[in-house]
Amino acid sequence: MKICIITGSSGLIGSESVSFFADKFDKIIGIDNNMRERFFGADASTEWNTKRLLETIPNFEHYSVDIRDMEAVEKIFATYQNDIQLIVHTAAQPSHDWAANDPIMDFTVNANGTLNLLEATRKHCPKAVFIFTSTNKVYGDTPNYLPLVELDKRWEIDTNHPYYTHGIDENMSIDHTKHSLFGASKVAADVLVQEYGKYFGMNTGVFRGGCLTGPNHSGTKLHGFLSYLMKCAITGDQYTVFGYKGKQVRDNIHSWDLVNMFWHFYQNPRQGEVYNAGGGRFSNCSMAEAIEMCEQITGKPMNYQYSDINRIGDHIWWISDVSKFQQHYPEWTWKYNIHDILQQIFEATIKK
């Protein structure tokens, strides 16, 4: 039997992974205890997604387990042993704003939880492929010291800089920078996943995501940029733009495109490899540009205010260079651009 374990299975990337891998494995085991509701409130609950997956994916089995609970995690792994061939670890506390309110919970979920899963994999299914959704926040605020140029609706990097064509690559240092506490806990997990690959020879891959998005995102004020922005555009709720004149740039990758990266890695895995994973030059926007696109799609003006105070550790300009991944897996490319993504989020949001 071929089994795939997915943590955070009711979240954006987790649920996309369940749907994507359902016809590729005999059984999909989801681990998710709806911590997103505890982090961000009732509006961020993923219970609706758990229910949807159970109703639509016949070979999906759900466990309401906290990844910090080593005994509960190990019990699942011990049950299936070497039948487990893929672990997609997406469960996390995902907000750098929230982390400052409870650093211990942030670290234990992100770092200790990842360690528990790595150890369970090493003990019970060491040949399995272990994929970790890391974050570009491991680079801290180093990108903010790049030579940036202010344009009419966005910040952009100087055209003479090596990053201009493809974006920021994996050689950027993760040291000597302000990460936010969330960034620090993800650095710990990121390095652990690399180390289990390089030290123990396990098939581990680290994917440092930019803005991960899609129609199944339970976006909230503190996490889920495009999803929450579109929700406000539809409802008329006030949205706050924090700092940088609203010209900060993000690349945005559709959850399906990211999970498709996981699929390519699974078929030809490496040990402790690291990849930047985002929309790159193919799919990116500034906050100001995103607001304009939301207004065009909804046909309504956005209700938003501006605050001069930027979020700590926030990036002014981030575009991921995915060239390394494309060199290793040349058959992969993006399917959805920023316009596709926003249109899908709009259609999904008005149905809820």
Image (spheres, rainbow, N blue to C red):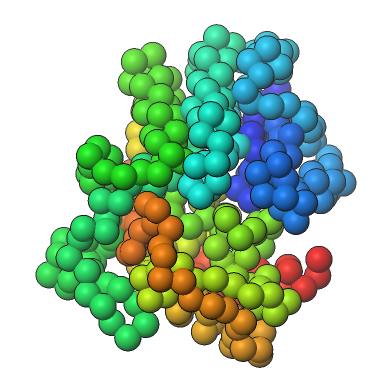
> Residue 247 location, x and y as percent?
38, 75
> Residue 214 location, x and y as percent?
61, 61
Task: Please tell me whether residue 309 is drawn above or below residue 218 in the rendered image.
Answer: below
Q: The C terminus is located in which quarter?
A: bottom right
Compared across the picture, whether 328 is left or right of 165 comes to right
* The quarter of the displayed image where residue 78 is located: top right
Residue under the point 71% across and 42% down: 38
User: Is any part of residue 90 visible from this angle?
Assistant: no
Residue under the point 62% across and 88% down: 301
Q: The N terminus is located in which quarter?
A: top right
Compared across the picture, whether 130 is left or right of 42 comes to left
Q: Residue furthest left?
A: 160
Task: Please tell me whether residue 298 is drawn above or below residue 250 in the rendered image.
Answer: below
* The quarter of the displayed image where residue 74 is located: top right
Task: Please tell me whether residue 312 is drawn above or below residue 14 in the rendered image.
Answer: below
Residue under the point 73% across and 69% down: 349
Residue under the point 30% across and 51% down: 141
* The quarter of the displayed image where residue 31 is located: top right
> Residue 260 location, x and y as percent?
53, 49
Q: Nearer the viewer, residue 83 or 194?
A: 194
Compared across the picture, whether 131 is left or right of 42 comes to left
Q: Nearer the viewer, residue 157 or 314?
A: 314
